[in-house]
Image (tube, rainbow, N blue to C red):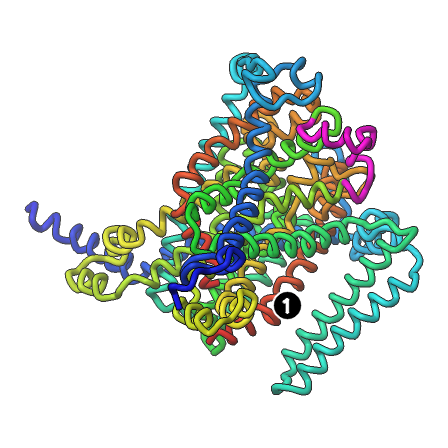
Amino acid sequence: MSAEPRSLARRLFEPASIDSQAPVTKIVTYALLFLWALVVVIPLYWVLITSFKGPGEVDNGPFYLPFVDFAPSLQAWDFMLVQNYTLRPYMNSVVVALASTLLAVLIGSLAAYALVRIRFQVKLAAVAIFLILLTAIIVAVATFGVRWEIAIAVAAALFIIALFTLVGRTKLAVGNNDIEFWMISNRIMPPIVAVLPIYVMFQQMRLLDTQVALIATYTAINLPIVVWLTRDFFAGIPLDLEESAQLDGASKFRVFFTIALPLVRSGLVATFLLVLILAWNEYLLALFLSNADAQTMPVLVSAQNTTRGPQWWNMSVLITVMIAPVIVISSILQKHIARGLLVGAVKG
Amino acid sequence: MTATDTMPEAAARRSWAEWLDGHSGRIMVLPAVVVLLCFAIFPLIISAYLALSRFALASGGFTLKFIGLLNFRKLLVGSQQYHLLGKFGTFGFVQWALLALIAAALLFLLARYLWRGRPTIAGMVGRLLATATAMALAVLALATMAPGGVPGTVVNTLLYVFVGVSVQFALGLGLALLCGQPIRGRNFFRVLFFIPLMVTPVGIAYTFRMLADMQKGPFAPLVRAFGISEWSWATEAWSARLMVLVGDTWQWTPFMFIVLLAAIENQPRDQVEAARLDGANGFQIFRDITWPAIAPIAATVVLIRLIEAFKIIDLPNVLTGGGPGLATESMTLHSFISWRTQDLGGSAAVGYMLLLISTIVCVSFFNFVVRPARRFEA
């Protein structure tokens, strides 16, 4: 059978073995993949070469190849990076993204670890009373002009009294899964709903347009993702290591920092990178909470959009310096970042 | 002397450490709970209050006046109706036919639930709520897209969410299937295709503005060849919306791709090989082996994407500024614009409408699509 020579058509349309593809299928596959590769690369390439153009090269019609159909210059780079203050928003972005990511990963992984390893029982009545009192404080302060210190003190007292009298008698309680679900579900909330009060809050604290405000807010919005991802990493490590350490008298914190965290190192790296890039790219909250001193790169770019709309070369420099780090990180560490995404999607 | 002095101190330290250890669980969870309370629950309640009141600047600060549901009335039937809901057109035959189709499909799903399985009250309430929401949104979308109608920000957002996510899912799945085949250079494509997902959306928006420039962009010669270089996509509602969708798709297709590719690589290899030996073609293998294997993950990525898609603001704001007119304005952008014009109550009300719609859609999707898909796997 195998000695029989195959016709040309059959050779083109049938795979040589069970593991490989027929030549025609292979060509089509590569053609489509390269087509999408072009779709991915062209926008990035265009930004990069435009940043080396000047007004003349942009206005006199499209030029595609540096050194071939136009002479690249560093004029725009010099103008945007040396003569303009791009460095400050850049440092803001770096500081805010790094600090908020570190905080979010620390706080989130602590909570996720505790939720995986320790059983919690919170009385539903306590949660309900807490929420009712919180609403009552807001209504009292906003509508009836009660001083907020007094409102909070009264509410706290009422809450403690309720905790010791009423709550103990009720049975309904929320467990670990409910707490976890609550934390993660915060991500469903569109940030625009929460940002107005956060804006007013920081205004009252005179923290508007500072890095602190941005760091705190970014920590909060990325916390659900950290809890969601690290929970699965912690659930995957065997119990016996931690148990033997605990028998030796190590505290839970010690076990967490010396045993659990190092074991999920690669998972933490994945989470860290993902959250870092999300914080780097964040736009809406920065738009509300910063305008000059704490301005981050995305806000700077969108603000320049109107004034420098036609100045493609200058805008391209800004965009290049803004997206270059994420492209470098995501292409070198693609495996790690993708791992974070996968854990999230697979376990849900 | 010293021994007796340090004894109680040491004991105190030990008991403090013991207390710390005994409550370690709570202490570990506490920071996360406090952060979420301060930045999610507390603002959410205040926002609810803002949505029900009128905000006005006064000397030395501002005043808030409780006005009940007036903000929502203004948005739904009052002066802001045009902004949020749009202008209703006249229903023609096509619209009625589509509406009938959607209604029939929803009723069929409801009936199937009642016929099969054991219906519960909670399940029924949830389904009725989902059906009613789907119906209302369908009527709104059809009416504003009918001749003479103008879609408002709700329909724009729905367009970005449903059309955008569908296209991204289809493209991502297609690319993942191509890349999941035994070809060389798979890793190269995986790394390259992943990049757009991580690029700052604001940068993407401006880049696509440059690319789509009809006179100076890279495609200008092509456009000139077709003789439409005088035309601009930014002046027409549908072409502007299309641009936003193109930018969004460029960014988010990689997300679908990377997750679905991993799922495809994990499908049962022996089954695929056995099917191939039996002479099954590519489509049959996909339908009977690959799809059932990746369905739960596919449903989950779509859910994640739905949640994020409702929040879209960067692309429309930078790419088109929400224009022409209101054609590309999303609900988040609408809320932001209301805030900028000092209409805090209206802004919060729009935010709450968005929260309501996105929660109902996402929870329904989770309950009626993701869960069955997972049960199917188990």
> Residue B40: horizontal and vertical position, in percent?
56, 52
Q: Is residue A90 above or below residue B345?
A: above
Q: Nearer the viewer, residue B374 or B253?
A: B253
Residue A48 among magenta residues: no
Residue nearest the viewer, comparing B213 with A274: B213
Q: Is residue B271 above or below residue A37?
A: below
B249 left or right of A222 in image: right
Q: Quadrant of residue A187?
A: bottom right
Residue position marked by numbered label 1 in the rendering: B364
Which residue is found at the position 59% from the left and 28% from the top? A46
Give the residue drawn at x 26%, y 65%: A239
Looking at the rendered image, the quarter that the N terminus of chain A falls into is bottom left
Amino acid found under the numbered disc labelled 1:
Ser
In the image, residue B233 lies in the stretch drawn in magenta? yes
Question: Residue B342, image x and y in percent?
Answer: 75, 38
Left or right of B293? Residue B235 is right
What percent of the width, then of the height, locates residue A269?
Answer: 36, 46
Q: Residue at x 78, y 67 (%)?
A: B135
Q: Considering the numbered disc 1 on the image, is that residue within a helix, a strand or a loop?
A: helix
Residue B354 to residue A43: above or below: below
Q: Is residue A224 visible?
A: no
Give the extent of the magenta segment. Answer: B217-239
Instruction: Find residue B96 and report its horizontal and vertical position in percent.
Output: 88, 66
Q: Chain of mark 1?
A: B
Q: Kindly indicate the quadrant of the structure image that contains residue A202.
A: top right
